[in-house]
Image (cartoon, rainbow, N blue to C red):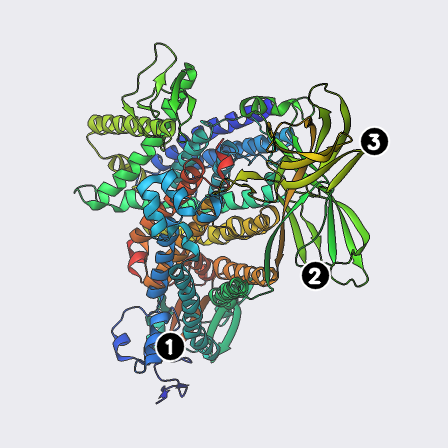
Amino acid sequence: MNEVKCECGHVNPHGTVLCESCGKVLEEKEINKQLLDMRYEGSARRSQTYNKTIIDKIWNFFSSVKVGVWLIVLTLLASIFGTILPQVMYIPQNIPAIEHYENEYGWFGKLYYELGFHNLYSSWWYLLLIASIGVSLVICSLDRVVPLYRALKNQRVTRHEGFLRRQRLFGVSEAPQSDEVYKTITSKLGSKRYNIREENGNILAEKNRFSRWGPYINHIGLIIFLIGGMLRFVPGMYVDKTLWIREGETKAIPETDGQYYLTNNQFIVELYDKEKDGEVFEQALERAGGVVKTYQANVTLYEKEGDTIPGEQPELVKVRDDEIRVNEPLKVDGLALYQVDYKLNELHKMSFSLQDKETGDSFGDIQIDLFNPEEQYDLGNGYSVEVKSYFPDFEFDEDGEPATKSRVPNNPAFVFEMKAPDKPDGEVSFVAIQETIEPLGDNKYKMTFKGVETNNVSGLTVRKDLTLWILGLGGVIFMIGVAQGAYWNHRRIWIRRIDNKVWIAGHTNKNWHGLRRELEAVFDGTGIEVPEDQSEEGRKG
Amino acid sequence: MAELSGNLLYFAFISYLIATAFFGGAIRSKKDGEKQEGSNKWATIAIVITIIGFVAQTGYFITRWIAAGHAPVSNLFEFTTFFGMCLVGAFIFIYYIYKAPWLGVFTLPVAILIIAYASMFPREISPLIPALQSDWLHIHVTTAALGQAILAISFAAGIIYLVKAVDQTVSSKRTFWLEVIMYSIVSVIAFILVTTAFTSVNYKAEFNYIDKKGVEAVYEYHIPALIGPNKGELVTEGKFEPLIETPAIIDSKKLNTVVWSLVIGLVLYWVLRLITRKRIAALLQPLVKNINLDLVDEISYRSVLIGFPVFTLGALIFAMIWAQIAWTRFWGWDPKEVWALITWLFYAAFLHLRLSKGWHGEKSAWLAIIGFFIIMFNLIVVNLVIAGLHSYAGS
């Protein structure tokens, strides 16, 4: 396209409003303005220049801050709706979600579910909003940063009169007679950390230009963060597994290809104790009752030695003993194991005694491991018990037949065949908790319940998240950028000698009070008047 | 140690009250037209008292930390008190940049209200549940509170801007909404008065009621029940019978407190208006007579600029790091997390509107007030009403 050649000789890209070099107003419509719009230095932004093709239109749409703000506000409003009722991941998982919402919150809950608000943050439209913000971030930044960089790089010391006159801080004074004054001014500016450039007696003092890049750097950080968030959906980057492990049990850690094993030696829930934990907490403990102090799994980590074929018992080498607590996950091989859940007093072993119903004589005890029952228990002297059937989580199914709901021994039931010297063919008895049925008629013997042993179970989350470092990088870059943009201001002061006058203009991208005070200090006692604030806000104050 | 801590807080509270009065004096003494920038004698005394109060409150914080063995930011009382302390700290900081005594007249009362509000909740030192036992407790919570406090300065500046800029000679949408803000502040005062009054007479009324799950339960009210629980039966004799009964899904006790605050707030508000025959904002207007609006706007903007990165760091980044350690994931769409995100998005929008759309002055002031409203919503409603992982902070 046509480039624009300014009278100063600099060639500007098509669409430039203010000459990159001298700042002369090149756009007709800007000429009548009292103050220049200095936001992007009047540079040629693609979005303001081209509007023909589809790509131009998309580019222009997403490069608009107005659109960006709308996207932010829409995301904000949408996010609010997701907090009215708990999201689906925080409701009990034992009944269908819709029933939960309807039972708990009535018609409103049902509507909430039907609108998809129960899982709002994973909905396609919410993700679309976030993605649009991402696109907007990229396009907005590119549209502005490149021309801005050009403009700031090409700026000359000697600026056009029209440019100076239209700055917010501007003043004309009689030129001082001696050059001493200029030396004082430059040294004062220097002591305020301004970089000074001089050209034909004109001065440009500038500082903290890097602060102008802050917004773009923080946008880069955000984009990296969003990319990190997307990578979670790439297989292998993210693992979320649950590992329930009983006391005394050894299990392979998921996602380690059977390389690592974990033994749960003990699971502890400890409450605060008024005596032991000091009297400061006394009042609080009295009011709240039991307050949990620790959830802790004492574990041993093992590594498999050598290769094993499936089904073969691996040879385990102890790596270390460890304690997994809330806030203190166990880390191994890029995985972290978190203590998140537990079950206390799960049935583990049950013992019975074989008895003569009438005399009450006992002929021996058996102890059944509810996770691994033996088929036959020999009691000696011709007495034995056979476990014909075992239902760990007993119920009657639809046909009225005994069945098991799960493999967890919540409600164990057995069909025993009891053999004795006088009953060589055996007697069959169905034994459940507090219930005995003798399906084949009256028996002589019975299995008497003697006791149970229980176990605690620790619920661990096994987590791998290879996206974390990308998210961290994005976060760090964002913080650098946002601090850079927020805590420093880009300030420039132009001093130009025209005939017997000296023209002074000042610009800052924010914090005008600071710049004004700085100018007051610089020109104090030089005989040059401090430039005045030409903006409406400035004049009012 | 715990007792010393409580006394220090009390001392700080009184100091802030006295300092407010002196800041008021600092504005008045400048009345004679000369618009001298910088400080005068009253302002110097006021800021010194503020700093003494701040030091005392820091003493409260440290002694309570020593007594408890953990940073005192683990429940609603502790967090809110700390938030008030940060607000005072942020004010002192901004004061030394801009030398603006009038900012004290509006910021310190906000801090005082926040601290008074905090002490309406259980104040005893409580032990930490396992999820809170981490160094990230003080890293995350204090940074987040500091960020919110700096952002809250823009609220005070916003109020000043509106009190001065909104024309009180005519009734308009602007005067209406400004009065709504004033009424909300009066309601907070009402809440503090009501709670303190009934606590001091030790009011207790027990109800048997049917809870959400259809089970019989007991509810103890500490202020008279205008709003009673579901199928509530008053057990304590001679106490006030509820006027209205709520369905089980609503927490009647909290609703009752809210209704009390709003009603007494309304009474106070109208008493004030009928006596003075002026809007509250109009009453405050003389205080802001000599203030340069442009400077107020700049302070408001500046505090958002300073506060936004701190808030991001504390309430999002540190929060995510801790969430990854304690809850296995850095982000879980818990209501508190979402509202932190909402706050962040709001101030991001604020900054973009200001930079690119030129929303300065009054528009910016209204936004600053909405932003503070979001922060307060996240502090109060999300903790007390919306159930989530952060709910423990409520008791």
Label 2 resides on the chain identified as: A
Tag in front: 1 or 2: 2
Task: Identify residue for label 2.
Answer: A257
Measured as percent of width and height from the top left, residue B346 is found at 39, 53
Please state which amino acid type lies under the numbered disc 3.
Asn
CA gap, disc 1 and disc 2 = 54 Å
Label 1 resides on the chain identified as: A
Measured as percent of width and height from the top left, residue B110 is found at 40, 36
Above or below, comparing residue A155 to residue A349 in the picture: below
CA gap, disc 2 and disc 3 = 48 Å
**In this picture, residue A189 sits left or right of residue A79:** right
Task: Identify residue for label 1.
Answer: A45
Q: Residue furthest top?
A: B238
Tag in front: 1 or 3: 3
Task: Identify residue for label 3.
Answer: A381
Task: Tell me the element at label 2.
Answer: loop
Classify residue B152 by image quadrant.
Answer: top left
Please state which amino acid type lies under the numbered disc 1.
Arg
Question: Mark 3 packing: few (<14 Cα in 10 Å), some, or many (20+)?
Answer: few
Mark 1 or mark 3: name the one nearer the start of the chain.
1
Q: Nearer the viewer, residue A96 or A80?
A: A96
Tag in front: 2 or 3: 3
**Both on one chain, marks 2 and 3?**
yes
